[in-house]
């Protein structure tokens, strides 16, 4: 049962790209709808846990949420440019590399030779995985306009990764309670989404539909915190990385994103490399 609880974040977060792809809407509508859903979920979590909220928690949480809105908004943009099957594994790999480097360089988390060695190996594995997922079959004759947009998609993902890094780094730096920060974080997420979507015709039926993605995100977030004391940080962290298999393969089979047989091999191997890198980082965090 504990392992099943630890798998919920992977299923929830892995399904966000698929659900948003099915629900439709532009990136601004998807981001705004998602943050509304996340705020609804965080209000429920606050009523259940009733954590102590002070000025520091609010400041850190809102700043974290603003940065998250940049990360998620740009990820949705990249999904529309490159497709879910390319964006999600590359984004996951880039986030893991970025947060690992931030932990090592800013917070001095690598103290021993073992940590430096394992961390460096994990980074190489993650980079290989992210590269494989974006690799194109040179013999492919399919005319997919997304293939010509990989460079633009990568630039968008770079901004997304910076936002996601800031979202986690500022919480670590602030050393605030993880459960207490959820509500202020959601407020910051919604505020950031409103700022980014201003003048973009973000309000509409698609926005309301995408509230579901926010509920998915909130469910993954809270079950991640609940699973850590039950199965440990290493197992919980590692299992959460399995969501890229759901989003990547689901986008191919459910959203109809085209891949050749060789590209399917690249994507599958890339996902496995990213998961292996995440597992190794999870092992280090134990």
Image: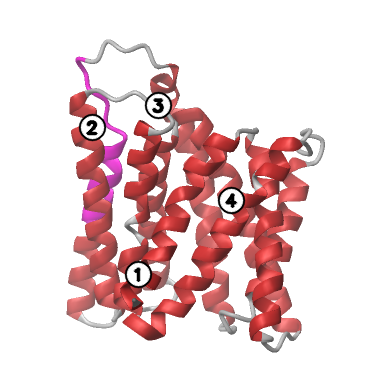
The answer for how far apart the CA atoms under marks 3 and 4 are is 20 Å
Foreground mark, 1 or 2, reads 1
Whole-percent x, y for residue 201 in the image: 79, 33
The answer for how far apart the CA atoms under marks 2 and 3 are is 13 Å
Q: Is residue 117 left or right of residue 89?
A: left
Q: Which mark is residue 4?
A: 1
Q: Nearer the N terminus, badge 1 or badge 2?
A: 1
Q: Residue furthest bottom?
A: 52
The answer for how far apart the CA atoms under marks 4 and 1 are is 21 Å
Q: Nearer the N terminus, badge 1 or badge 3?
A: 1
The image quarter containing residue 136 is: top left
Q: Which mark is residue 194?
A: none
Residue linked to disc 3? 256
Which sits in the foreground, 206 or 201? 206
Q: Nearer the N terminus, badge 2 or badge 4?
A: 4
Residue linked to disc 2? 264
Q: Which residues are magenta?
A: 124-139
């Amino acid at each position: 049962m504990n392992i099943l609880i630890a798998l919920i974040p992977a299923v929830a977060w892995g399904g966000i790209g698929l659900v948003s792809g099915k629900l439709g809407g532009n990136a601004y509508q998807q981001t705004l709808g998602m943050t509304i859903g996340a705020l609804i979920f965080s209000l429920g979590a606050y009523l259940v846990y009733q954590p102590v909220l002070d000025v520091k928690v609010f400041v850190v949480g809102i700043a974290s949420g603003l940065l998250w809105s940049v990360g998620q908004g740009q990820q949705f943009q990249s999904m529309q440019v490159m497709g879910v099957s390319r964006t999600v594994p590359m984004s996951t790999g880039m986030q893991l590399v970025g947060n690992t480097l931030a932990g090592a360089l800013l917070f001095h988390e690598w103290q021993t030779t073992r940590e430096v060695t394992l961390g460096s190996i994990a980074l190489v594995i993650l980079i290989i995985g992210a590269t494989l997922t974006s690799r194109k079959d040179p013999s492919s004759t399919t005319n997919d306009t997304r293939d010509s947009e990989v460079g633009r998609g990568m630039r968008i993902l770079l901004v997304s990764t910076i936002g996601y890094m800031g979202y986690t780094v500022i919480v670590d730096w602030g050393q605030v309670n993880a459960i207490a920060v959820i509500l202020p974080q959601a407020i910051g997420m919604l505020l950031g989404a409103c700022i980014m979507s201003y003048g973009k015709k973000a309000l509409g039926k698609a926005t309301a539909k995408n509230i579901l993605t926010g509920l998915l995100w909130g469910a993954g977030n809270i079950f991640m915190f609940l699973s850590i004391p039950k199965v440990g940080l290493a197992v919980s962290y590692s299992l959460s990385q399995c969501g890229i298999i759901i989003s990547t393969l689901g986008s191919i089979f459910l959203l109809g994103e085209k891949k050749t047989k060789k590209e399917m091999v690249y994507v599958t191997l890339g996902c496995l490399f990213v998961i292996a890198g995440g597992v190794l980082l999870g092992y280090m965090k134990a």
